[in-house]
Image (tube, grey):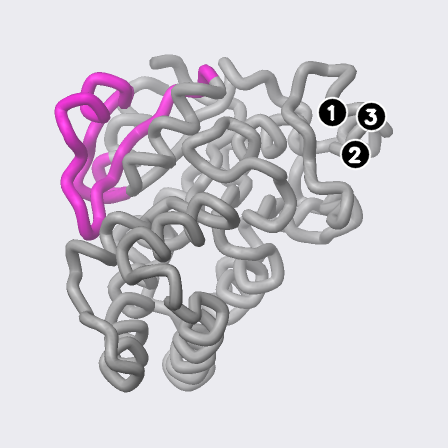
């Protein structure tokens, strides 16, 4: 694995310890509404969004499961916690970001969470400065915008035409900005296009198996930092490395530089 020009961060369970927070708040809502609250069920949904997430939820809880209502109530509970305490940053993340930015390595977030929440969490944790577009050398070329026409012409999977992240001031791609969610490669390819970096010159940091699969499909090296679930042997083979925290990622990159 060579030193990257761009490091693409997942958010939930990678930058922030939000997977466990979301799971705990969701379990409270599930119990209130008469549904079973099991960690193994939640783990099955990690890394999914959009249609794939809805299909998995209906498979787990049944066809009458009120997905939108439960997600809304869970999100409200999570937001209340974050507004009061801020999101808990995972070990080693800020040191890694400082080191990357100090060496001019670009940083971007590509998360299944919708864009507005990603930005909110980054700002609330005061990590947004590491992902500001005016700090990054991303240029102002028209072909960096991932609208439908330019995306298809350049071999990048279609990006949701309802969202255009090119005008945003943070280097973020949310799950609502691509048509296909992880494990499809769309979100990571869109991040590379946004940052004007070839996939082979990027590095993905992921906690979820679907995130590693998406990076592999995009032909981007991925380091897996497990959160709630340890990776299967299949995922271990796909990943460039499996490390316990961002601290070890920093040590690895320092050794290679």
Q: Point out the residue furthest to the front here.
A: 63
Q: Which residue is mark 3?
A: 149
Residue 244 in view in this figure: yes
Q: Which residue is mark 1?
A: 151
Q: Residue at x 45, y 15 (%)?
A: 219
Q: Say left or right for 141 vs 85.
A: right
- Marks 2,3: beta carbons within 8 A: yes
- Marks 3,1: beta carbons within 8 A: yes
Element type where label 2 sits in the image: loop
* Position of 91 relative to 253 (above/below): below
Query: Residues in magenta?
Result: 219-248
Element type where label 1 sits in the image: helix
- Marks 1,2: beta carbons within 8 A: yes
CA–CA distance between discs 1 and 2? 6 Å
Image coords of residue 35 (percent x, y)? 24, 74
CA–CA distance between discs 3 and 1? 5 Å
Determine which quarter of the picture holds residue 182. top left
**Residue nearer the viewer, 26 or 187:** 26
Q: Which residue is mark 2?
A: 147
The 10 Å Cα crowd at callout 1, few under 14, some 14 to 19, many 20 or more, is some
Q: Say left or right for 36 vs 66.
A: left
Image coords of residue 139 (percent x, y)? 78, 31
Image coords of residue 109 (percent x, y)? 52, 45
* Position of 17 relative to 166 (above/below): below
Element type where label 3 sits in the image: helix
Q: Residue at x 35, y 56 (%)?
A: 57
């Amino acid at each position: 694995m060579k030193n990257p020009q761009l490091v693409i961060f997942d958010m939930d369970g990678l930058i922030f310890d939000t997977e466990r927070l979301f799971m705990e708040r969701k379990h409270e809502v599930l119990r209130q509404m008469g549904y079973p609250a099991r960690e193994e069920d939640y783990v099955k949904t990690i890394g999914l969004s959009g249609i794939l997430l809805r299909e998995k939820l209906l498979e787990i809880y049944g066809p009458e499961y009120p997905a939108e209502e439960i997600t809304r109530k869970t999100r409200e509970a999570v937001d209340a916690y974050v507004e009061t305490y801020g999101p808990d940053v995972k070990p080693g993340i800020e040191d890694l970001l400082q080191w990357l930015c100090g060496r001019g390595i670009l940083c971007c977030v590509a998360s299944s969470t919708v864009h507005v929440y990603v930005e909110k969490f980054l700002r609330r944790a005061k990590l947004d400065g590491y992902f500001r577009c005016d700090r990054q050398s991303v240029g102002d070329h028209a072909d960096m915008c991932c609208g439908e026409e330019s995306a298809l012409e350049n071999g990048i999977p279609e990006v949701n035409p309802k969202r255009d992240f090119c005008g945003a001031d943070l280097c973020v791609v949310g799950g609502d900005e691509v048509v296909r969610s992880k494990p499809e490669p769309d979100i990571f390819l869109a991040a590379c296009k946004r940052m004007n970096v070839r996939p082979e010159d990027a590095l993905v940091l992921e906690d979820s198996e679907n995130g590693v699969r998406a990076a592999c499909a995009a032909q981007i090296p991925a380091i897996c930092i497990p959160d709630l679930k340890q990776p299967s042997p299949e995922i271990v083979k796909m990943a460039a490395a499996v490390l316990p925290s961002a601290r070890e990622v920093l040590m690895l990159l320092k050794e290679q530089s």
